[in-house]
C-alpha cells in the first residue's frame, strides 16, 4: 500500500470529521500519534482539548453554549500500564477499563473484546462511526486501529459493522482513519482500510502541518504526541482554535 501525503489528503477534504493517526517516526525512534476533531454545529465547535496529566479530555469552551454533552465531552486519550488509547468517544473508557480488569489478556484481545460491547454513535441519520486506536509500548511497539460503523439496514437502523486492523510499525509510516468520507447531508461514513500515511519531521513541524491542512471553518482541536521508544519520554502538543 503506497503511503499518502496526509497533508494533501486533508487539504482536499473539507470535513473528514474526527481523525486518528498512529505510526512511527522516520528514524524509527518514536511512536507517533495524533487526534483531531472538527465540527459543523455550534455544539461541536464549542470545544477545546485540555491536558490532564498524561491524559486528554474535551471541554466546552463556553459552557453556556453546551446543549448536549453526551457525544462531545469525553476522554480522547488515556494511558494504561504500557501503552496509550486514543478514540473519538467515550469508548476510550470502555477499552481502558477492560484492559485494567483483564491483566492476563493480551492487549490485542482486550481491545477487541471491549469494542465488541460498543457500536456506532446514536446520532441518526449520520450514525457516526466510533474510531479507536491502541499503542503497545512495552516488549516491542505495536499498534491497532478499529472502526465501528453502520452496515446493512436492519429494523430501521444499520446493523453494526466492527473492523479491526493490526500493524507492525514501519519507520516513517503511520495509519490514518477518520469518521467521514467528506462533507455531505448526511455525511458519509469512512470506507475502506485506514490509509498508510508518510510521517516526517519533528513534532512541531508535524503538528503545524496537520493543523494548517485542516479546513479553516471546521477544525476545532488537535493533539499530537511523540514517545521515545527507548526511554519512554513523551512530548505533547495541543492546538485549540478557541484559544
Image: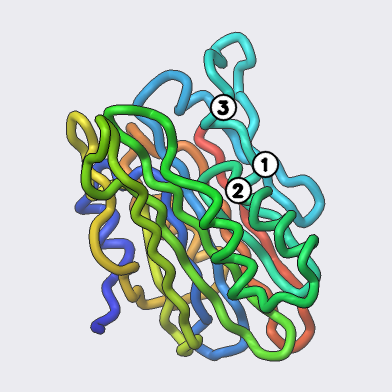
Where disc 3 sits, the SS reads loop
Callout 1 touching callout 3 (CB < 8 Å): no
Residue at 32 percent across and 62 percent down: it is 7
Drawn side of residue 151 relative to residue 223, left or right: left
* Quadrant where the image shows the N terminus: bottom left
Considering only order in the chain, which callout, 3 or 2, is on the residue closer to the N terminus?
Answer: 3
Q: How many labels, in total?
A: 3
Q: Nearer the viewer, residue 211 or 71?
A: 71
Where disc 1 sits, the SS reads strand
From the image, state whether disc 2 or disc 3 is nearer to you.
3
Considering only order in the chain, which callout, 3 or 1, is on the residue closer to the N terminus?
Answer: 1
Callout 2 touching callout 1 (CB < 8 Å): yes
Drawn side of residue 2 relative to residue 6, left or right: left
Q: Marks 1 and 3, how far apart in space?
A: 13 Å
141 to 206, vertically: above or below? below
- The residue labelled by disc 1 is 57
Q: Which mark is residue 70?
A: 3
Residue at 72 percent across and 46 percent down: it is 51
Image location (x, y in percent) of residue 11? 25, 53
Considering only order in the chain, which callout, 1 or 2, is on the residue closer to the N terminus?
Answer: 1
Residue at 46 percent across and 27 percent down: it is 45
Label 3 neighbour load within 10 Å: few <14, some 14-19, many 20+: few
- The residue labelled by disc 2 is 76
Q: Marks 2 and 1, how far apart in space?
A: 6 Å
Amino acid at each position: 500500500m503506497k503511503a499518502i501525503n496526509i497533508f494533501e489528503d486533508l487539504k482536499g477534504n473539507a470535513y473528514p470529521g474526527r481523525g486518528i493517526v498512529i505510526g512511527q517516526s522516520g528514524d524509527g525512534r518514536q511512536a507517533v500519534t495524533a487526534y483531531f476533531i472538527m465540527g459543523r454545529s455550534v455544539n461541536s465547535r464549542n470545544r477545546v482539548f485540555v491536558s490532564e496529566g498524561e491524559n486528554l479530555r474535551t471541554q466546552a469552551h463556553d459552557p453556556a453554549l453546551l446543549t448536549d454533552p453526551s457525544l462531545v465531552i469525553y476522554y480522547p486519550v488515556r494511558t494504561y500500564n504500557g501503552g496509550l488509547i486514543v478514540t473519538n468517544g467515550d469508548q476510550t473508557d470502555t477499552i481502558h477499563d477492560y484492559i485494567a480488569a483483564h491483566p492476563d489478556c493480551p492487549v490485542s484481545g482486550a481491545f477487541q473484546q471491549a469494542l465488541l460491547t460498543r457500536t456506532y454513535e446514536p446520532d441518526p441519520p449520520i450514525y457516526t462511526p466510533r474510531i479507536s486506536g491502541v499503542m503497545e509500548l512495552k516488549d516491542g511497539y505495536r499498534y491497532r486501529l478499529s472502526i465501528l460503523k453502520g452496515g446493512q439496514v436492519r429494523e430501521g437502523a444499520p446493523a453494526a459493522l466492527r473492523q479491526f486492523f493490526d500493524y507492525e510499525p514501519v519507520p516513517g509510516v503511520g495509519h490514518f482513519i477518520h469518521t467521514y468520507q467528506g462533507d455531505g447531508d448526511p455525511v458519509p461514513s469512512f470506507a475502506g482500510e485506514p490509509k498508510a500515511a508518510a510521517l516526517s519531521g519533528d513534532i512541531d513541524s508535524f503538528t503545524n502541518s496537520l493543523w494548517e491542512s485542516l479546513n479553516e471553518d471546521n477544525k476545532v482541536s488537535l493533539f499530537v504526541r511523540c514517545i521515545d521508544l527507548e526511554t519512554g519520554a513523551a512530548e505533547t502538543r495541543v492546538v485549540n482554535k478557541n484559544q
